[in-house]
Amino acid sequence: MSKSRKKWLIPMTMLLSISMLLSACGGAKDSSNGSASNGGSSDKPVELIWYTIGAPPKDLEKVEAEINKYTAEKIGVTVDMKMIDFGDYSQKMQVMAASGEPMDILFTSSWAFDYVQNARKGAFMELDELLEKEGQGIKEVLDPAFLEGSKVDGHNYAIPANKELPAQEVWRFNKKLVDKYNLDISKVDTLESLEPLLKVIKENEPNVVPLAISKDFGPLTPYDAVIEKMPMAVHLDDKENLKVVNTLESPELMAALKTMNKYYKAGYISPEAATTTSTQDLFTSGNWFVDRAATQPFADNLWSQSYGYPVVSTPANDPVVYNWSVMGSMQAISANSEYPEEAMKFLNLLNTDAKLRNLVDSGIEGEHYKKVSENVMENLPASKNYDVPTFTFGNVMLTYLNPEDPENKWEEFKKFNESGTNAPLLGFNFNPSKVSSELAAVNNVKEEFWAPLMTGTVDPEQYLPKAVEKLKAAGLDKIMTEVQSQVDAWKASK
């Protein structure tokens, strides 16, 4: 699989974050005269230690040397890139941040090395003034919703990557099976509307899993969760009162869980769904019919290229900008960085200079890729030695297109970003300090029943009331009261 195809898969499935404006793409926004301001000089560049997520590729040092030639000349800065694999990143960064390990720039997000939690702990530097002084290029290219939605207690502590801003889910289909049985997916827009198609597959394809889901699946309901995969939320339509409700007691969730249980009993869902951690083997073998995934413009092309067979999709909900979608990929400056101004100059260049952004993303021109035209590239065989996750490094809309990408790809991203409506709690971040023991207890109870309920493995009419009772005994009502009080204070402060 080619680098450009593979490295997009993580944001498509694990994430969904970040946005927009292409007007400032291309030219470098040089915010420095080439000398470093904190202890460096034009003779000796300042070296920044940069921790970021992803398996370190074989040619990292070779590419880093080219990056440093460029940035030393541009802004008097070099970087020492330290990449840590996805599975280890959060834990290793927590340990290093707590021990005061020297670092300047570090990847953080809503799902890895938790942004809000670590901003509150003091791991990251507050960036408001630095953004004004050295980050004007960033402010020009980012949709304002990124910086607004990623504030913690009124301040910015990291720079969100400029990519897809809203979160939208789609029903995603194996096109071979859609074509084979001449199925009409245009009418599919809800969980319930899948039923006739699942029936056809179940009756005719014994080796295919009709609805491919893992233990992390959850039916879509119209709520903005205060904490992901926890039951405290505000209805998406409730932008005035912001009433916090228990989604496990909502009619929408009960209806969806009944449908899931019906599908489970009919054999449309794998019997192991509640303990399955990944459906990747089904995508490799092609033995699946439909699943649900986070989308972005031209996602079908990416999935089709990645799996080696055609995938088509239809919207499962509307695009909405949530806190977690804004915070899906961010770069912070360490609170103990010796060179915060240089770090911000580097991040500004990374987000505004196409040459640097593509060097970091695709490696060395002529070795790892070749230019097909001004903004289109093609991977060379050596690209396998430099394979990094595109979405983690800032302004994705500066990256070169692949030959199969449509010319208007980034314009479509911009339209997609503009199409999202803001969730009611965008910009609100719950402070759990007053109810931390209750949250831990609720989380333990949740682990028992969440996956069996959400995957349809158990009957919700029997199981859900028991779950709610146990959660309340663990302190859910106290948490909800504290959440409501913080939401009310936040609403009043706006």
Image (cartoon, grey):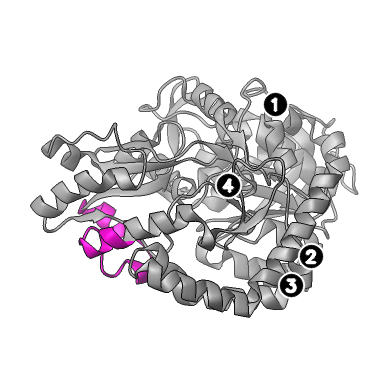
Q: Is residue 197 above or below residue 458?
A: above
Q: Which mark is residue 435?
A: 3
Residue at mark 2: 121
Between disc 4 and disc 2, the foreground one is 2
At a point 88% along the width and 41% down the height, the residue shown is 129
Cα–Cα span, label 3 and label 2: 16 Å
| Pointer 3 with pointer 2, Cβ within 8 A | no
Sooner in the amino-acid sequence: mark 3 or mark 2? 2
Residue at mark 1: 28
Between disc 1 and disc 3, the foreground one is 3
The location of residue 299, given as percent across then percent down, is 40, 36
The residue nearer to you, when weighing 15 against 484, is: 484
Amino acid, disc 3: Val
Amino acid, disc 4: Thr
| Range of magenta residues | 261-287
Between disc 1 and disc 2, the foreground one is 2
Sooner in the amino-acid sequence: mark 1 or mark 4? 1
Amino acid, disc 2: Lys
Sooner in the amino-acid sequence: mark 4 or mark 3? 4
Q: Secondary structure at mark 1?
A: loop
Q: Secondary structure at mark 4?
A: helix
Sooner in the amino-acid sequence: mark 1 or mark 2? 1
| Pointer 1 with pointer 4, Cβ within 8 A | no
Q: Is residue 220 left or right of residue 482?
A: left
| Pointer 1 with pointer 2, Cβ within 8 A | no
Between disc 3 and disc 2, the foreground one is 3
At a point 66% along the width and 30% down the height, the residue shown is 353
Sooner in the amino-acid sequence: mark 1 or mark 3? 1
Between disc 1 and disc 4, the foreground one is 4
Sooner in the amino-acid sequence: mark 4 or mark 2? 2
The location of residue 1, given as percent across then percent down, is 32, 46
